[in-house]
Amino acid sequence: MRQFFALPIFVMLASQAAAQGADATKSWDEMLAAARQEGKVIVSGPPSPELRQTLPRVFKQRYGITVDYVGGRSNETAAKLRAERQTGFVSVDVMVGGIQTMATILHREKMLDPLKPALLMPEVIDGSKWKIGKLWFSDPEQIYVLRITNSVGTPFHINTDKVRPDELRSAADLLDPKWRGKISVQDPTTPGSSSNHAAVLYVLFGEEFVKRFYIDQKPAISRDTRQVTDWLARGIYPITLGAEDSDVDQLRKQGLPVAPLRSMADVPGVTSAGFGQVAVLNLAPHPNAARVFANWLASKEGCEIFARAKAAAPLRNDIDESFLPPEVIPRAGVTYFDGYDWEFTMTTKEQVRLRLKELMQTH
């Protein structure tokens, strides 16, 4: 009897799978047709000239839909979106950015539409195309914020004309009086990557270390990534916490004496998506185009363009990563500190930011 029923059941399952595939194709075609009717999509992303030029050009060639790319700091964009919603107006369809903005503003204040149900491209929803075997959603509901990159970052960078790596073998070496006034940091009291760095140091080494580093060592404090990177390249502040790996790598390729600091044995590699997260806004002016763009950014073509522009390790496993330094690609079996962990972002990081603000105001 088992053999008698096996064939009909197999045929039935195969028919169901084919029907589901046809429905998905139909849904994608319908979404794409509606997106083309809308004609454009407004994307807020990192201030990258390469992304500003390449994403709109390739997406327009692929789908005939115009991309208005708005580059800027994620927290500033989020503040603008918050103000807009009070008037019932939304100016952005898609947000591409970091965890702080996604978690503590857009998600917490319910500005996002579920993205997972709108992911319909076969190559996007195929788990075998992703390094972890599935789509990586950062949010606890696993439907809103899609992570498309995951890189090993180095919190500190040095000017090698001024600092030798063997002078900084552990985090405690950063507290040596000879480095007082020679370190630059991004403002740890502001939300974003700067507070993320501070929170990682706080978790690893405690409050006393953080107090001595951010206050006693008298670092130069800036809210501008380009400024701390410029200080580093000029040797004005030859140790920096806050420069982007991709910017430092570009300067190094131009022959400037800058390098990531990897000699501190007690500072583990910190993984993050950087700006490599995508979400769609609810009440968006171009909802179908937003979903098509999110699908495409998670596809091989879109993800590779983004990863190359930001020198980030893609989470897809079908992209040639030879353009990256090997050390930024997470290795199997190695333990990293995930600076983009949702709970860390929503609780620890904010607590540390507020505590540091209090400490710095009293000194």
Image (cartoon, grey):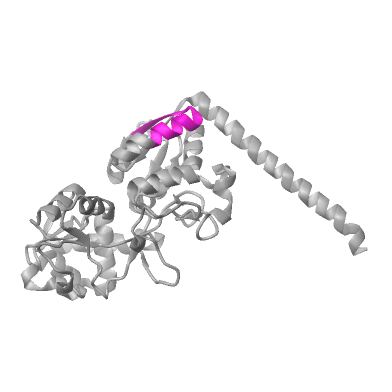
Helix, strand or loop for the magenta stretch, by majority = helix
Residue 82 visible at all: no
Q: In the image shown, does 142 or 174 lie closer to the viewer?
A: 174
Pick whichever, 243 or 117, lies toward us.
Answer: 243
Residue 35, magenta (yes or no): no
Q: To which quarter of the image does residue 119 belong?
A: top right
Image point (51%, 61%), residue name: 132
Quarter of the picture holding the C terminus: bottom left
Vertical position of residue 228 compared to residue 173: above or below: above
Where is residue 230 drawn, in percent x and y?
14, 50
Residue in front for this viewpoint, 319 or 30: 319
Q: Position of residue 185 (x, y in %)?
A: 17, 58
Q: Which residues are magenta?
A: 55-69
Left or right: 172, with 312 as reference point: left
- Which residue sits at x=55%, y=59%? 133
Quadrant in which residue 120 is drawn: top right
